[in-house]
């Protein structure tokens, strides 16, 4: 980022990580318990959920201003969720390639134009998971179709961007990456950093 305000340069005092033990491990996450010292000097026991993948999120935008949302039941909150296409990729892999794969797997689409939109920390009080979000333009049916995970039962809907944005602002879409990406795209359309015809189709 350029043009950072001065307050962003403040780092403050760090946490100190003491002895650690792994209390749970699987192919996706590792839970580690630390004997830690807080920036205040207070002793603390800290549980950290370490992720073995980046989260990737993709906002596909068609020239007519429509986008694609994916519906699925999410296990942790036991709720159905409508989201932009999302998934994960190994930390050592190119996140853009992971995003290309996820878009094809979940929507059957590929994009000619990819633009990084945001980087985010997800639940950074207990987790080290990071997310990268991409705008996908120049959409067409994927030539190399990938099969979705055998645990995923997905619904796909193509809706006007403004309808998805309004649903997020009304609280009907709660996935944080979906909300953040829709807000960023709306801001980009208003600020003139998207092609004018596309911005007009998105927000009028």
Image (cartoon, rainbow, N blue to C red):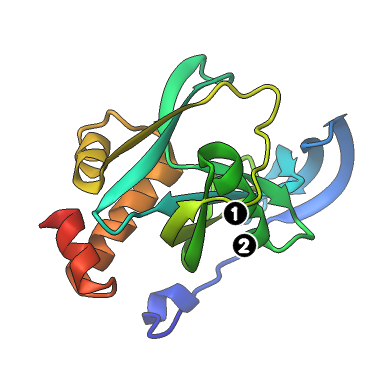
Q: Residue sitting at 67 percent across and 41 percent down?
A: 146
Residue pointed to by mark 1: 99
Seen from the viewer's position, the closer of residues 92 and 125 is: 92
Q: Secondary structure at mark 1?
A: helix
Q: Which mark is residue 108?
A: none
Q: Residue sitting at 59 percent across and 54 percent down?
A: 99
Outermost left residue = 204
Seen from the viewer's position, the closer of residues 39 and 28 is: 28
Relative height, residue 202 to residue 126 (above, below): below
Outermost bottom residue = 3
Q: Residue sitting at 27 percent across and 67 percent down?
A: 188
- Residue 62 in percent (x, y) is at 33, 54
Q: Crowding near pointer 2: few (<14 within 10 Å), some, many (20+)?
A: some
Q: Crowding near pointer 1: few (<14 within 10 Å), some, many (20+)?
A: many
**Are the residues flagged by discs 1 and 2 in contact, CB closer than 8 Å?**
yes
The quarter of the image holding the C terminus is bottom left
Question: Left or right of 84: which side holds 37?
Answer: right
Question: Left or right of 143: which side holds 71?
Answer: left
Relative height, residue 152 to residue 189 (above, below): above
- Residue 21 in percent (x, y) is at 89, 37
Question: Left or right of 150: which side holds 109?
Answer: left
- Residue 52 in percent (x, y) is at 77, 46
Q: Residue sitting at 55 percent across and 68 percent down?
A: 12
Relative height, residue 86 to residue 16 (above, below): above
Seen from the viewer's position, the closer of residues 118 and 146 is: 146
Q: Using the numbered discs, state the Cα–Cα distance from disc 1 to disc 2 in whole angstroms.
A: 5 Å
Q: Which mark is residue 96?
A: 2
Q: Secondary structure at mark 2?
A: helix
Seen from the viewer's position, the closer of residues 185 and 199 is: 199
């Amino acid at each position: 980022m350029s043009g950072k305000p001065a307050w962003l340069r403040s780092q403050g005092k760090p946490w100190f990580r003491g002895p650690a033990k792994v209390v749970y491990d699987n192919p996706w996450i590792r839970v580690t318990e630390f004997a830690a010292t807080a920036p205040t000097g207070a002793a603390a026991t800290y549980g950290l959920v370490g992720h073995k993948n980046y989260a990737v999120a993709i906002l596909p935008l068609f020239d007519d201003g429509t986008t694609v949302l994916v519906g699925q039941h999410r296990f942790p909150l036991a709720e159905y969720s409508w989201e932009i296409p999302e998934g994960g990729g190994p930390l050592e892999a190119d996140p853009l390639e992971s995003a290309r794969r996820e878009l094809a797997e979940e929507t059957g689409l590929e994009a000619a134009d990819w633009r990084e939109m945001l980087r985010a920390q997800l639940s950074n009080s207990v987790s080290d998971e990071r997310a990268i979000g991409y705008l996908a333009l120049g959409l067409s049916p994927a030539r190399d179709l990938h099969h979705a995970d055998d645990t995923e039962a997905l619904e796909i809907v193509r809706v006007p961007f403004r309808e998805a944005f309004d649903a997020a602002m009304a609280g009907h879409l709660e996935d944080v990456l979906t909300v953040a990406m829709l807000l960023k795209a709306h801001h980009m359309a208003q600020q003139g950093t998207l092609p004018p015809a596309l911005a007009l189709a998105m927000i009028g």
